[in-house]
Image (cartoon, rainbow, N blue to C red):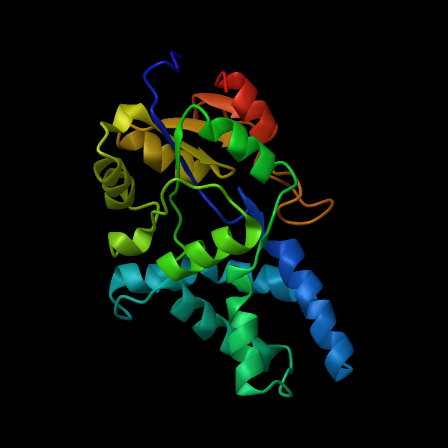
Amino acid sequence: MQNANIAALTFDAFGTVVDWRGTIVREGAAINERHGLAVDWARFADAWRAEYGPSMNRVRSGAIPWSNLDALHRLSLDALLDEFGVDCLSDREVDDLNHVWHRLTPWDDAVPGLTRLGRKYVLATLSNGNMSLLVNMAKRAGLPWDCVLSAELARRYKPDPEVYRMAAAYLGLRPERVMMVAAHHGDLRAAAAVGLRTAFVHRPLEHGPGAEADPDDTTAYDIAADDFKDLAHRLGA
């Protein structure tokens, strides 16, 4: 694949740039300590993430009106707190827990890798996270984006094709001049279907130690990298 024509890289956020599971587990452990609880926050985090796709599908199907990801996360969180028997948190604490998604910790290679990539390419998010979530995440984690793009702008959710077309349009580029970067094959297949280039980044710890990560699938992407530093090397940055 020729990389010379690529002008911008768009990045999935959850799992690709930031460690959603590890962050939730750490913040949950602090809640356990404050309130004398024994919640299994690893299981809680997995259950919360498992509601991600189904909650967006309810929007797609028209079962509920358009709602941004903060609102969808809150619906899932309220149900999970009941399921896990957590009834001692104040309204303020529940709000703060729902906003843990704004505070996700980047993978160790994310900031240095993005900094290198940013010397050669325009860098943008392309996430299902809402705009405020992505801006707060970037500010807290020091993520060096040139542009924050959210599925919220299209009022659709990935992998709907309108989201990827929206990103190319906002960047003022033909789709083939944009490369989607993600740790998830479904995201990359959907991006490729509308003409974007694609890069797979391995994130073996996304679902925790010992969990199965997305395996190699060379039909789903143009290039693969071990992390963002390796991606920078492969793209000549």
Q: Residue at x 44, y 74 (%)?
A: 75
Q: Residue at x 51, y 68 (%)?
A: 99
Task: Locate residue 179 relative to residue 84 in the image: left or right.
Answer: left
- Quick one: 131 or 176, which is closer to the camera? 131
Q: How many marks?
A: 0
Q: Residue at x 27, y 66 (%)?
A: 66
Quadrant of the rendered image containing residue 202: top right
Task: Locate residue 68 relative to residue 185 in the image: left or right.
Answer: left
Q: Is residue 40 visible?
A: no
Compared with residue 149, is residue 55 higher up or lower down, i.e. above or below? below
Quadrant where the N terminus is found in the figure = top left
Compared with residue 79, is residue 119 higher up or lower down, i.e. above or below? above
- Quick one: 63 or 98, which is closer to the camera? 98
Q: Is residue 148 visible?
A: yes
Locate residue 154, reporting x and y percent: 24, 52
- Quick one: 95 or 63, which is closer to the camera? 95
Task: Locate residue 32 relative to residue 21 in the image: left or right.
Answer: right
Compared with residue 92, is residue 217 higher up or lower down, i.e. above or below? above
Q: Residue at x 50, y 30 (%)?
A: 200
Quadrant of the rendered image containing residue 135: bottom left
Locate residue 213, reporting x and y percent: 61, 39
Locate residue 136, reporting x and y percent: 47, 58
Task: Locate residue 57 relative to residue 13 in the image: left or right.
Answer: left
- Quick one: 43 or 36, which is closer to the camera? 36
Locate residue 169, reporting x and y percent: 21, 37
Quadrant of the rendered image containing residue 4: top left
Compared with residue 190, is residue 130 higher up or lower down, i.e. above or below? below
